[in-house]
Amino acid sequence: MRNKLVSSLLIVALFSSVLAACSSKDNSTGNGNASSNAGGNSSGNEATAAADNAKDQKISIDWFDGTWEDPVPGPDSEAVKKIDEKFNVDFKPQYIPFDTYEEKLAVKMASGDIPDVIGMESVDANYMKWAQQGAFLPLDEFLKQYESTKAVPDYAWDSLKVDGKVYGIPTYFSPKGGKKPVIRKDWLDKLHLKMPTNYDELKQVIIAFTKNDPDGNGKDDTIGLGLAKGIYYDPSFGAYYGNATWYNKNGSGQYIPGAIADGNKEKVTFLADLQKQGILQADWAVTAYKDIFKAFNAGKVGVWYEQPGGSGNNGIQFDVLKQNAPSAEVVPIPPFKAPDGSQGLTISGSWYRMYMISAKLKDQPEKVKRILEMIDYFHKPVNFDQRNSQNEYFDWLYGGEGKGYQMENGAAQPIAENRSNVAPSAYITDGGWFMKDEDLFAFPKMAKTPAEQAFQQSLADLLHGSKFYVNPTGRIISPILMEKSGELQEYITTETTKMIFGERPLSDWDKMVQEYLDKGGKDMIDEVNKALEANKIQGEWK
Amino acid sequence: MVLLALVGLLMLFPFYYMIATSFTSGAESATKTFVLFPQKWVTDAYQYIFNSRVFVRSLFVTAGVTVVGSLFSLLLTSMMAYPLSRNITGQRFFLFLVLFTFVFGAGIIPTYMVVKATHLIDSYWALIIPGAINSFNLIVLRQFFLGIPNDLTEAAVLDGANDLQIFARIIMPLSKPALAAFGLFYAVTSWNTYFNALIYINDPDKWTVQVILRQIVILSQRLDSLSDGQQAAIAQAAPPGETIGMAAILIATVPILALYPFLQKHFAKGVMLGSVKG
């Protein structure tokens, strides 16, 4: 007890000294930046010259972001020179692999070493904290000025608002993207089964896939339903069933997460029944999901997941699957019709990665303008048939044909080892809002094998034709939701896993829901619904 | 004896598994959850890594930082430990200062601010200077120096040697075993430089092998809890396969592992020396 007290006192002391240091540092670097900028300008005084020859001024921009590019883009590459020339700037980028980016960003922000442009992957507690502390520039006044930001739908802006103001510019990521359930169509055909349209039919299909030797090798070695530790890739077939979708409402009309709604109960009952009959693979509760991908590539799994555009080496590899199961045909499973009559998938977000501008630039409108122009320039949608060297814009973004990319079967494929050096789009995220799923339909054209092409085409067709539910929690920022939803979901996962194995009776469902509410679920639901009401947001179908 | 041998083999198994996986072809590893013995031994993964300019470069960077850093650390540590082992004024005070840092660290952010203020950001010295003296090592080394009898240094003084000469000609040669041990500690720490490189170095060309390794491993292993957007982005970056991840881990581990047998010799000798001269 005493130890705890001492250590917490020490932590407080440490923390306050850190904070004090930050605030003092803030000021000094702020001034330092301004003066060094002024010094760098040939015209000398930035403020007076700004009005006349703003365009001619070379502006220095510190750009800090994470990346998945391999190798990580460096500070003096050909691409940096291209960006310097194009926008008349001194572009100073710093990129860190995303999995460790957060740590470095937190250190930089806390020590007051704030870059001009800050990239982040998604909205999180840090984004909210820094926005509230005034580290970022509010961008609302600019959003109507650029083509790229005008195209962003309201529900995307909603997701970026902190206390009513937008601080980040998002980069498009298909709202219909993400892992979708897929099935081996050749197995269905071989066993004369129809595509399942509800959990009962799915159960019959899974049993047949497991027991009736769909791959015809005479061995009992197939997995009907791929299921992995933590019920990873929640086997939900529509918005009504999704654990993380706030679609259902409770008795008092509040939105509740799918994890504690009837849809999940139906799903867990379905899985428990399969478990009882010995249909699920015996060790699913300790199998990593990546191992199911491997089993799928080996041609042994009937129902599993893949996303538009595929997941490269980390997902279904159609060339490998073809070697192991030459007749394999993979198609997506359409959403089930739910008991309430709804039938459709969920939109959880429509963007991935965003840019914030440091609040220190509030007195440098020219610099802010230049940065926004740069982002706007990169954020233009390019249709598939334009993605080649004839299109000057695309060619520039991707570093030129033969250098940054090469054409294979009419599709531009990046040259991995050169891209970080020559392609400006390895530095600043590219892509604008597509309105008619053009991006989904481009995937089949970029596919490397006919089997993959057929799958991507059927997936694009299905997603284009499906209804989508906009998850209302994606449009608000709720601190309790951010803090609690993960651990609460884990609780449900653990308890429902017990139910599937029969260690806890299904009749305990209501008790489990009550435990969930007592563990903080109620506070979360209250806060989310309050935020939804305050912002007049409903769950809606698109 | 047999049991010991079995346990020993068990310890080697993870290494064997890494070697086996790294020599497996990409297509085979995409279907097998566990490779005990590859159907075909291929060197694709190693070719990929040695063709990647970034990885090879980072190996050289790390080797440089390790060599310079360990020597620098040894020099500074022994130069401080020695005086603290002799009767000098303020000995207790300086010892207290060392012990204080042993218990209380400054934390990441103040340290970052010091490194930034001293203009070490983006310099290899940022990887060497901040951790140059490990207070634990310093105290143990001082303990070792205390075991060297004062008579020796007094004799040297009579022969006309000054303090620096005594340190360089008498103390250091007598301390070879201790220096080998601490050299190894420092070398391993330098070789494993990861967080400092990440925080203090902005230019990817100057990153140490551990930073690059982590990126390769993250990209090559299908990690849990990635968002849809992240997965799509990783897929677009054409991630290296699992075999490459394993090969990279091996290449990054073997050089420092190879250091142990060489220094082992000195350890053994060290024990003997100490016991005789007591």
Image (cartoon, coloured by chain):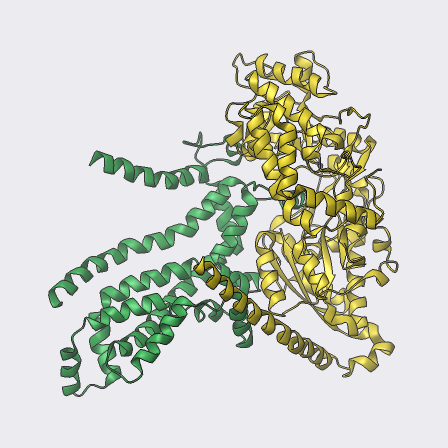
Q: Which residue: 21% across, 77% down?
A: B169
Write down the quadrant of residue A251 in the picture. top right
Percent x, y of residue B176: 23, 67
Q: Nearer the viewer, residue A519 or B178?
A: A519
Q: Residue A36, image x and y in percent?
A: 68, 79
Q: For residue A279, say whether it is visible.
A: no
Instruction: Establish if A362 lies above or below A460.
Output: below
Q: Is residue A492 left or right of residue B258?
A: right
Note whether A97 is above or below A135 in the view shown.
above
B92 left or right of A304 in image:
left
**Is residue B183 positioned above or below A201 on the image?**
below
Q: Which chain is green?
A: B
**In the rendered view, does A316 fall on the left or right side of B96?**
right
Tell me the shade of chain A: yellow
Q: Quadrant of the N terminus of chain A?
A: bottom left
Residue drawn at the location 36% of the way across and 55% of the way down: B256
Q: Position of residue B54 (x, y in %)?
A: 53, 56
- Quadrant where the image shows the C terminus of chain A: top right
